[in-house]
Amino acid sequence: MAAETGTPTTLTLKSNDDELFSVAESAAILSVTIRNMVEDGCAGGVIPLDNVDGKTLASVITYMNGISAIPADEEKKKSYRDKFLSDKDFETLADMVLAANYLNMSCLMDAVSAKIAQVMEKKSVGWVRRKFGIENDYTPEEEAAVKEEHKWTFEGVETDDDN
Amino acid sequence: MNWGKCNSVYTNTRTRPYYSRRCKSSLTKFDSLPDELVFEILLLLSPKDIHNGARLVCKKWYETVHTRIFRYEHIHRSTVGILILKSYCEYPFFVAMREGRVEVSKLRYKFGIESTVWSSCNGLILDFDSKKRKALYTLNPATKRRFYLPQFPSQWEDHNYYYSGIAYAEASMEYKVVRTYYSCSKRNCVILTVGVDESWRSVDAEHLSDAARKSLRDIPLTTDGFVHWFGRNDVVTLNVETEFLTENAVPRGYGEGLNEYSWEVFELILETGEWRKMYTIDLARQRCKIERFVGECCGTLTNYDFGTTNSRKCKNRNFGNENEN
């Protein structure tokens, strides 16, 4: 890869709200989307990233710089990812997972997905629907039937009321 | 595991249209999340969160978590551990390795006195309800979901030898339950695909030697896709994919000089029927340590069963031969 030879190259990335960011090529190519552009020689000028806004791109670049500064130590990388995501709210995580998907950054995507799943733990159905913007498309009868199915699950099972 | 009664929700799954009605006024970022990303996120949820939450969110999520590919992926990411049942009246313990550390948790499920845990595979337990329905059922302890298997025909009912095993056929992504019984002075074997078959099917055992066939009376051991019965001199193995029984001689000198804390591990080369000794596990020196550990986890064990709740990590065709003691 070009980044591994000679002097460090800098790329300019443009968000969909026209903010410009400079980032070392060696960090930016964590994104397979960007790496392919670099390898195809289309990264000469400004790289437009139409699906990512400035706020999210700034955050992703912070991550790119942070993680690429860590040598090949999976433990340290993991703890960096945990720390990086620890203060992000649910909406930001949504932006991040979409950006990571668009940029094809599997390590970030896995980490954000895991974080989202962790936040969803023990949350009510209503909470999940609100956060994911999903309308309940069960008719009352269907919902009752699914709940009935749930009940059936517990058929013949002792209740957990002694603790 | 199985659609069971939920089929009543949708009378015709195939023609039922997808509704992706969405509330435009409360559009969130996740509204534009592609299905693959939703799939990935749902995969990371625990069985409990899927059961109590995700499947009730909307129809699309319900269908996603019920697809075979979802189940397959979910199994392959699950934690492997051991279920320790101290007594049927107490909660079992689940001992698992997570990131190099041993974690002990209590499973919030009681088996009850009427049950007899037979076998387990990928976290699914095969149990027998000896009181109420007198039938085998599969149990997912994570969701507490029970699924009763079709009744065993009464003419086959044999109260002396009713051991069963459950194994996973990877290619077809189906669970199969195998059961043996005694009839016409012979031990026979029947099989059933969980959630598919409505009756038990016979497995051809006529080609087995008399001695090998006798071993079918014992408690089977299951490893990935295989069910094994151990006789004095033979091991009978059923491949649940092909549903074909094979017989192999027990490795020479097996079990000699072993104690209850040591095992020999052999690999059976199915093509040739030969055994290759892989290694010996000797934990006799660590005996005190093990007993202390088990004691700390679960109190003193008097009468216990060990069952792997996920046999995925067991190497195919490998099994330790425990010294009969």
Image (cartoon, coloured by chain):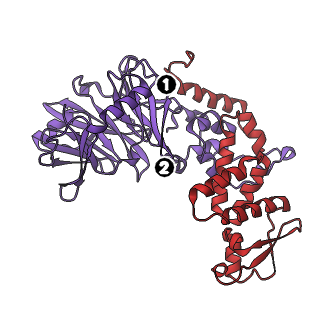
Q: Residue A40's spot in the image, x, y percent? A: 68, 82
Q: Is residue B190 visible?
A: no
- Horizontal relation, residue B189 to residue B46: left or right: left
**Residue A56 against residue B245 in the figure, above or below:** below
Circle number at residue B69: none
Please, what is the three-letter code of the amino acid marked with disc 2? His
**Residue A4 against residue B222 in the figure, above or below:** below
Quadrant placement of the C terminus of chain A = top right
Q: Which chain is home to disc 1?
A: B
Q: Which chain is home to disc 2?
A: B
Q: Residue B280's spot in the image, x, y percent? A: 24, 48
Residue shown at the point (53%, 27%) measured from the top left: A153
Q: Residue B62's spot in the image, x, y percent? A: 62, 41
Chain letter corresponding to the colour purple: B
Residue situated in front as seen by the camera: B163 or A135: B163
Are dots 1 and 2 in contact, CB under 8 Å? no
Please, what is the three-letter code of the amino acid marked with disc 1? Tyr
Residue shown at the point (12%, 46%) measured from the top left: B253
**Element class at badge 2:** helix
Q: Is residue B135 visible?
A: yes
Query: Disc 1 or 2, which lies upstream in sequence?
Result: 2
Residue at the spot of label 2:
B76
**Mark 2 packing: few (<14 Cα in 10 Å), some, or many (20+)?**
some
Chain letter corresponding to the colour red: A
Circle number at residue B109: 1
- Horizontal relation, residue B160 to residue A136: left or right: left
Q: Residue B120's spot in the image, x, y percent? A: 38, 36
Q: Same chain for marks 1 and 2?
A: yes
Residue shown at the point (62%, 54%) measured from the top left: A78
**Mark 1 packing: few (<14 Cα in 10 Å), some, or many (20+)?**
many
